Image: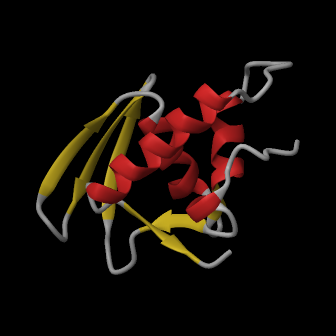
């Protein structure tokens, strides 16, 4: 799947769970409860933020923005990527980054 909608700062970058961090997490349906023992904060994440972070927690390495969008669209067979999907994915990743749960890294 080609995703030309991710241009600018997202292109060529990947995402990972923030370094030097240990997260304890539990999933319930479309929600994820995450405890960050570095900051002693607990986060309640709803879909799609929960799906994006869960994909990163389960991955064996960094994931690109298009790969994360693919996880969000999983189960939506035949879904086409629209600008709204790309914008929503960028907003989710920005929010997770601001919360200190994920960070950009080299692919």
Percent from the top left, x then y, of residue 80? 80, 24
The image quadrant of residue 99 is: bottom left
The residue under the point 22% across, 44% down is 43
Q: Quadrant of residue 58?
A: bottom right
Please state the horizontal and vertical placement of residue 79, each as a whole percent of the image: 79, 20
**Is residue 37 positioned above or below 20 on the image?**
above
Above or below, comparing residue 60 to residue 34 in the picture: below
Q: What quarter of the picture does the N terminus occupy?
A: top right
Horizontally, residue 4 falls left or right of residue 61, namely right
- In this view of the protein, which residue sits in the foreground, 9 or 44? 9
Image position of 18 (left or right of 33): right
What's the residue at 74%, 19% (across, down)? 76
**Residue that lies at the very extreme toward the left in this rendered image:** 40
Query: Is 48 on the left-hand or right-hand side of 95?
Result: right
Whether 11 is drawn above or below 70: the answer is: below
Quadrant that contains the C terminus = bottom right
Q: How many marks?
A: 0
x, y percent for residue 52: 52, 44
Left or right of residue 55, residue 41 in this image:
left
Residue at 39%, 70% (x, y): give it: 18
Seen as rendered, the residue at the extreme front is 8
Q: How is the image coloured?
A: secondary structure
Residue at image location 19% in from the left, 71% down from the top: 38
Q: Nearer the viewer, residue 55 or 10?
A: 10
């Amino acid at each position: 799947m080609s995703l030309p909608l991710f241009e600018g700062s997202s292109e060529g970058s990947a995402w990972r769970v923030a370094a030097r961090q240990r997260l304890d997490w539990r999933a319930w349906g479309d929600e994820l409860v995450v405890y960050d023992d570095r900051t002693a904060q607990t986060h309640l994440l709803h879909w799609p933020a929960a799906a994006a972070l869960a994909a990163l927690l389960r991955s064996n390495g960094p994931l690109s923005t298009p790969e994360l969008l693919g996880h969000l669209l999983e189960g939506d067979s035949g879904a086409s990527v629209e600008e709204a999907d790309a914008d929503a994915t960028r907003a989710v990743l920005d929010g997770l980054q601001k919360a200190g749960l994920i960070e950009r890294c080299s692919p």
